[in-house]
Amino acid sequence: MQRRKFSREFKLEAVRLIKDRGVAVAQAARDLDLHENVLRKWVRELSTDPQHAFPGHGQMKPEQQEIDRRARKWRS
């Protein structure tokens, strides 16, 4: 089975269902055909760092870019 990918917009809307509309996580997960833990993770990511949450495929958060840069420098 192939792993499903979701756009940033989809994740934001899914979290809005819970935060803005008051839908229970369990109900939102059923409605969106997601596992509750996935939805809880998205809620946590958005609350922790709203500006950098869900950066997209191939894009890294600034702190991850710094770690990657240092790792490449160390390997050289």
Image (cartoon, rainbow, N blue to C red):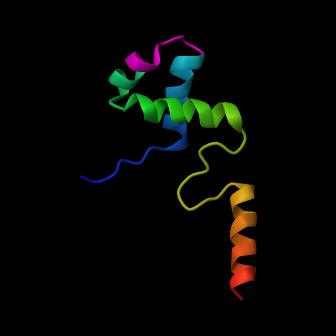
The location of residue 50, given as percent across then percent down, is: 70, 36
Query: Quarter-wise, where is residue 68 in the image?
Result: bottom right
Viewer-closest of 13 and 71 = 71
Determine if the magenta segment contains residue 41: no
Task: Check the image and report above or below for 75 versus 2.
Answer: below
Rendered view: 61 above or below 70: above
Residue at left offset 64%, top offset 42%: 53
Res. 58 image quadrant:
bottom right
x and y, in percent, of residue 75 in the image: 68, 84
At x 45% / y 36%, what residue is drawn? 38
Q: Which residues are magenta?
A: 20-27
Point 61% across, 50% down: residue: 55
Q: Quadrant of the C terminus?
A: bottom right
**Percent position (x, y) of residue 29?**
39, 25
**Residue drawn where x is 76% and y is 65% of the image:** 66
Q: On the picture, is 12 further left or further right than 2?
A: right
Residue 14 lies, in percent from the top left, at 49, 28
Q: Quadrant of residue 74?
A: bottom right
In terms of secondary structure, what is the magenta stretch mainly?
Answer: loop
Asked whether residue 26 is drawn in magenta, I would say yes
